[in-house]
Amino acid sequence: MAVGFDVSGATTSVYNGRMTIFVVMSCLMAAMGGLIFGYDIGISGGVTSMESFLKKFFPVVYRNMKEDSTTSNYCKFDSQILTAFTSSLYIAGLFASFLASWVTRAFGRKTSMFSGGVAFLIGSAISGASVNVYMLILGRVFLGIGVGFANQSVPLYLSEMAPAQYRGAFSNGFQFSIGVGGLAANLINYGTQKIRQGWGWRLSLCLAAVPATLLIIGALLLPDTPNSLLQHEIEIDKAKQLLQRIRGTDDVDDELNDLIKASEISKTMRHPFRKILRREYRPQLVMAIALPFFQQVTGINVIAFYSPVLFRTIGLVDKFGRRALFIIGGIQMFVTQVMVGGIIAAKLGDQGGISKGYALLVLILICIYVAGFGWSWGPLGWLVPSEIFQLEIRSAAQSITVADG
C-alpha cells in the first residue's frame, strides 16, 4: 500500500501496489543518468591535474606548477582559460535545464533523457579528440547540455515511477549513481595518468561515452511514466496498463483517477514559469531555489572537482525523515570543512607542501565530508524538490532546481 497525494500535495488516500521487478529495473536504469554528472565531475578534476593535459592546453599553469617555485600554492592554478574550461559545463547546463523543461513537458521524460545522453555522447567525442582549448570548451558545452537534460528529467522519472513509500529510496539512487560515476572517474584517472605517452587524458574524456550510452539505451528501452502518458493525451487504457504493471496489481483506479485529475489541470497550463510565480506556489518556488542553493553552499562541487588538485598540492531517507538528515549531515560537513580549512591555513604555506601525516588527515576528513553529503544534502537535494511539485508546474520547477544547483 502506498500513500497518495492530490494535486495540492496534501495526503488524501492510500494506493494499492507493491514493489515489482519491473519498476526496480526501470528506476535503476534511469538512475544511471546520474553517472554522467558524477563521471564528469570526477574526470574533469583529475584531468586538470595531469601534467600532459596542462602542458598541452594550459602551459602557463603547467609552468607555474613545475618550474616557478616563487608562485604561491594558492595561485598555481589561477588561469582565466582554465576557469572557462571548468565553468563552461555549468553555464551550458543552466540554460539547457530550461530548454529541457519544455522538452520534458512537450515530449515526455524519455525524450529528455535521450537528448541528454546524445548531447553527452557528442561532448565526450569532441573532448577526447580536442587539439586546442576551443575544442575542449566546445566539448564541455555539449557535456553541460547533457547534464542539464539528465538532471532535469531523471529525478522526475524516478519520483513518478517509484511507489510512494519507496520514493525516497529510489530517488536516492540518482545521487548514488552520481557517486558511482565519480568513483569510476577517479579510478580511471588513477590509471590513465600513468600512461607515459601522455594521451591518458584523452582516454579519460572519451570514456564519458560509456555512461552516455547507458543513458541512451535506458531512454530507448524504458517506458514513459503514467503521468507523462496522461499529460500527452495518450489513451487512458495504456496509462492504466502501465500503472498496473509497475504497481503489480490490477486495482489502481484510485491512483489513476488522481493522476487524471492532475493531468487535466496540467493541460490548462500554458505558461508554467508564470504559474509558479503565483502566490499559491510560493512555498514550492522557495524550496526549488533554496534547497539546491544550500546544497551547493555545502561546498561539495569544490571538493569533488578540486580534490585532485588539492591532493597534488599537499603532496599526496525514508526512515529518519528529511529534516533530521539535512541537519545532521550539514553539521558533519561543516565540522569537517572547518577542520580541513584550519589544517591547510596552519600548515600549508605559499611554497612547498605539508607533512605526510597532515596530508593523510586531510584525506580522511574529506572522505568523512563526502560521506556526510552522500547521505544527506546530496540525495535529498534531488529527492525533496521532486516530491513537492504539482504536475502542472513540475517540469518548470525541476528546471529551476537544476539551474539553481
Image (cartoon, rainbow, N blue to C red):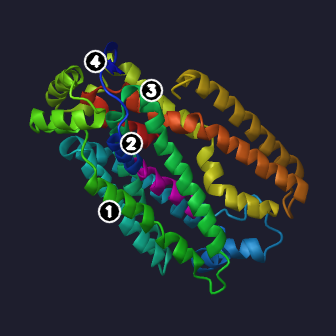
Identify the amino acid type marked 2.
Answer: Val
Across and down, in percent, residue 388 comes to: 38, 25
Q: Which residue is mark 4?
A: 6
What secondary structure is marked by label 4? loop
- Marks 1 and 4, the one that precedes in the sequence: 4
Compared with 304, 399 (above or below) is above
Across and down, in percent, residue 400 comes to: 38, 37
Q: Nearer the viewer, mark 1 or mark 4?
A: 4
- Marks 4 and 3, the one that precedes in the sequence: 4
Mark number for residue 24?
Answer: 2
Horizontal arrangement in the rendering, residue 388 relative to residue 371 (left or right): left
Horizontal arrangement in the rendering, residue 266 relative to residue 46 (left or right): left
Q: Residue furthest bottom?
A: 197
- Marks 3 and 2, the one that precedes in the sequence: 2
Q: Which residue is mark 1?
A: 118
Crowding at dot 2, Cα within 10 Å, few <14 / some 14-19 / many 20+, comes out as some
- Marks 2 and 4, the one that precedes in the sequence: 4
Across and down, in percent, residue 79 comes to: 62, 64
Q: Could you tell me what secondary structure mostly forms the magenta stretch?
A: helix
